[in-house]
Image (cartoon, coloured by chain):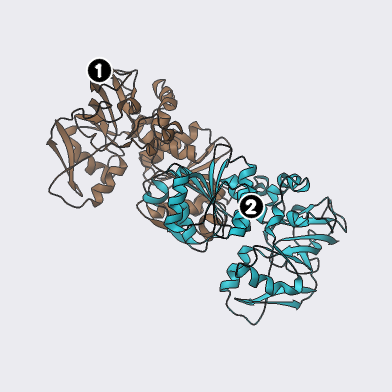
Chain colours: A brown, B cyan
Amino acid sequence: MWAALMYGAGDVRVENVPDPVLQQPTDAIVRVVRTCICGSDLHPYHSMPAAGHGTAMGHEFIGAVEQLGSQVPGFKRGDLVVASFAYQDNTCEFCREGLQTSCPSGGFFSEAQAEAVRVPQAAGTLVKLPAGEDSALLPSLLTLADVYGTGYHAAKRANVNPRTTVTVIGDGAVGLLAVLSARQLGAEQIILMGRHNARTDLGRGFGATDVVAERASEGIERVRELTGGNGTHAVLEAVGYKNAYQTALGVVRPGGVISRVGVPQYGEAPIGFDSLFGPNLTLTGGPAPVRAYIDELLPGVLDGTVQPGKVFDRTIRLEETPDGYRAMDSREALKVLIQP
Amino acid sequence: MWAALMYGAGDVRVENVPDPVLQQPTDAIVRVVRTCICGSDLHPYHSMPAAGHGTAMGHEFIGAVEQLGSQVPGFKRGDLVVASFAYQDNTCEFCREGLQTSCPSGGFFSEAQAEAVRVPQAAGTLVKLPAGEDSALLPSLLTLADVYGTGYHAAKRANVNPRTTVTVIGDGAVGLLAVLSARQLGAEQIILMGRHNARTDLGRGFGATDVVAERASEGIERVRELTGGNGTHAVLEAVGYKNAYQTALGVVRPGGVISRVGVPQYGEAPIGFDSLFGPNLTLTGGPAPVRAYIDELLPGVLDGTVQPGKVFDRTIRLEETPDGYRAMDSREALKVLIQP
């Protein structure tokens, strides 16, 4: 089959690789119907050391079940399914607590930008979709694999509710869907920090009440002006760079929550008296256990209440994947949908 | 009046200073009936640069009202009162949210190791006690000024409840009262990390189910053994040194909460993928808004359900304050009560 492989920073190739095969009775093989490129794929695209071999990429997909191991109840060949970007058994104590990303039988996909994927722990990972392969809802349904659930995780962890004011840092797909999620959870003031007009316009459509294009101290000043000087109860940080964390510290209200879903590209950062401790701030977040949210978010996608698929602004074929990375990296494209 | 002054690290003197006077109509002057030395007073006792002048010390006191400004309704001369270690108006939006430590009209006491104290924002700061100056409950009532409310804050912020397993790091007064608080909130497994037998025995009396005397990686290993390998849902960190934070990271369960009430003696620390982010940990805590908890905790003290005053293991006169600091610093004494 054909698959996208990364050979180092800036070097993505589409090559012929062996077809995936069932390895465990809990596995399934899924033919990929839609996959996409994630903002987090850009981190290795910037920094991966050049290697003589390629690394498979991609962790978001909708597909059709092709083969099932003997221990995958509830599915049949041909079912259209979405997978969470982390696989899990969905039965262990962590999964039952809604923390599927810490499932001891779990792990992360990294081979979805391909024609087919082996799905470990398929019974706990795949969710059947009441839609056909030609459904216009596929882009929105695909966001359930990661970016929508990740934005929602940021908002849930921050305890966003109708009495919460919110700042979202980052106008990438996750930031925009954090806006959508905050709105769904009832927040009435949602300030989106971002400076790409097309994206922040989409953010307004998702529910942002204010857009702050300024960055660093100017951006902090602007958010404070918009909030009576105090900052917002919740800050949803969807970038991952240390300056985004510093901005979060600047715009959060005393007693508030900084909820991170951008994968931190740093190790240490300020958490002492003058940053987190003195104002009783809470720092939370992490890789989203999106499986925990799919059942809750699916109905709104199916009935059209929300259209998270609007984050996709370009569709390509699998063989064009290298150009898809380039387009996202240069910010020509917000999020690239791949149709194998 | 007589008051304790710190002239530099290790140098506490009791000297005659001017009596406090009313400065604002919202002030009160309180004659100190009991005060004490706090673990946090030991930080300047270790590090304060020597100076030609003394710095007033102390932030915990029970006293009798001596003078009232014109805007202090609800009190009369002679009332026995306890003050929270931070003063506040208790009417602003932060106070109404239970975050009195962020009150714009607020601040921290630092002159309570004396015969009398000026209390700013007295109406929002003082709480009348239904007890006499000779009550046997005074030590327990005094813990409402700081250490009990601070331990309780740690447990509340960590959302301790009957389904929560808890580790408490630190066997000082705050750590021990974090144990008591976790028990009050229903936790059934409470692991106390500390190595001073007299203190950990008191911790067992307060509700600790396990004591871990080992430190660092050995201590982490031991807590993991006690928790099926996973660590505890809540970690209440009542020390403030960076190694205590590192220990907290080691003993917290994925998805769990590290709640800090020990004043951090560090600025930056690990919060990246491998520490906080990957396992979806939450970091919270800060200076306790103890005023928010006094009404809730007072009844249990008055009816003897809890005896937080057991943390006091030495009582001295005000003129012996320098020796009190020495005794706490050398760990001869857990917490020193001062009877002016």
Report how far apart the C-alphas of labels 1 and 2 lie in the structure: 59 Å
- The residue where tag 2 is placed is B177
Q: Is residue A267 left or right of residue A319?
A: right
Label 2 Cα neighbours within 10 Å, binned few <14 / some 14-19 / many ≥20: many
Front-lying residue, A291 or A45: A291
Q: In which quadrant will I find the N terminus of chain B?
A: bottom right
Q: Secondary structure at mark 2?
A: helix
Position of residue A225 measured from the top left corner of the image (x, y, whole percent):
54, 50
Q: Is residue B83 above or below residue A131?
A: below
**Viewed as shown, does residue B333 lie left or right of B219?**
right
Q: Can you say whether A209 is above or below B287 in the image?
A: above
Residue B157 point in image, percent of width and height: 57, 46
- In this rendering, does residue A211 appear at all? no
In the depicted structure, whether residue A166 falls above or below residue A297? below
Residue B179 appears in view: yes
Subunit bearing disc 1: A
Quadrant in which the C terminus of chain B is drawn:
bottom right
Residue wearing tag 1: A78
